[in-house]
Image (cartoon, grey):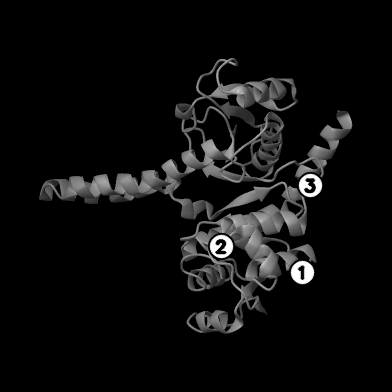
Amino acid sequence: MGGDFAPANIVAGGIEALRESNNRFEIIFVGIEADIKNEIAKLNADGLSYSIVHASEVIDMHESPTVAFKQKKDSSIVVGLNLHKAGKADAFLSAGNTGAVMSASTLLLGRINGVSRPTIGTFFPSQKGQCLLLDAGANVDCRPQHLVEFAMMGSIYANYILNSPNPTVGIVSIGEESSKGNEVTIEAHRLLKESKLNFIGNIEGRDILKGKAQVIVCDGFVGNIVLKFAESTLGFLKSKFKSYASESIFKKIWVGLMYGTLKKILKDFDYQEAGGVPLLGVKGISLIGHGSSTPKAIKNMVYRAEEMAAKQIDKQIAKLMSNTNTNE
């Protein structure tokens, strides 16, 4: 029931994932049953593997996450996460209130031992393939140890999902030198240098798209600013091409001829391709989608959830954190 276009886009994306994958998995739609059935009736869903679990309440986008979680026990977010916790679902995903999903995931599923704060990771294209940035907004104020934990969880994710064994790790800072940055990044640099991770040092903002590091760590304040700026890139470039094409018929023809190539290039900047971002550090698989998620974004988020569940990302993180704590 979460998102700007729920439940229409959520249902459409889920049904498309089932149809495209030939019923490779089952989807449980959680929310107001009558509304969900109404949307399914508009689609060709005969023979597809889905079920509906009724949840009578909805956490709105503007509500306080902690207050809503406590007061709306029958919300789609709480009911869905309880299904996951009970083992009736292998993963949970939502395009609803980000804070509510994070709070409910942490409180209901619990934190993995050794994880101080769960983190949101987000993907960026680069000259060397996809890279993962953590934190993308879950933790605005961080201590050095938090950044180390983000790096550890991000390394596991990059290894199993991005197929990057021993991924490189960098800290976002204002200079490459270890002495550059604030107190948190300087101390985190020291701790990461002493760790067993493939730490390459500080990286600057211009290095993200160059692919200098496969796992990029920063606090959620910096990470969210980077993310929102990157999200604006696609719309800006599209508007520039449109403006250029409007100048003359010849320029319009040129842009038309280049459309296929431009579309392939800009595809890497489209949030719909990734679908959603993982919440790492909880005992389960929880993904958070954009509030304005399209059916395509929801479909791809379903695929990402399936992959994370199949590769047991939460258990791989737990194993690494346990080994690290034992070694210490």
Q: Residues within 10 Å of mark 2 (few under 14, many from 20)?
A: few
Q: Is residue 79 left or right of residue 217?
A: right
Q: Residues within 10 Å of mark 3 (few under 14, many from 20)?
A: many
Q: Amino acid at mark 3?
A: Ile
Q: Is residue 26 left or right of residue 182?
A: right
Q: Is residue 174 above or below residue 96?
A: above
Q: Is residue 252 above or below residue 135?
A: below
Task: Please state which of the two labelled residues, at mark 3 or mark 1, is closer to the viewer.
Answer: 3
Q: Please report contact status of discs 2 and 1: CB closer than 8 Å, yes or no.
A: no
Q: Residues within 10 Å of mark 1 (few under 14, many from 20)?
A: few
Residue 86 lies, in percent from the top left, at 80, 66
Mark 1, residue position: 88
- Which residue is rendered at x = 48% and y = 35% of the image? 126
Q: Amino acid at mark 1?
A: Lys
Say which mark, if any, is on residue 179. Answer: none
Can residue 130 be spotted in the picture?
Answer: no
- Which residue is rendered at x = 62% and y = 42% of the image? 139
Mark 2, residue position: 63
Residue 200 lies, in percent from the top left, at 62, 22
Q: Amino acid at mark 2?
A: Glu
Task: Please state which of the two labelled residues, at mark 2 or mark 1, is closer to the viewer.
Answer: 2
Farthest residue in the right direction?
326
> Quick one: SS at disc 1?
loop
Give the mark, 3 or 2, whose residue is nearer the N terminus: 2
Mark 3, residue position: 112
Name the one closer to the observer, 225 or 314: 225
Residue 51 lies, in percent from the top left, at 66, 78
- Number of disc labels: 3
Q: Quadrant of residue 300?
A: bottom right
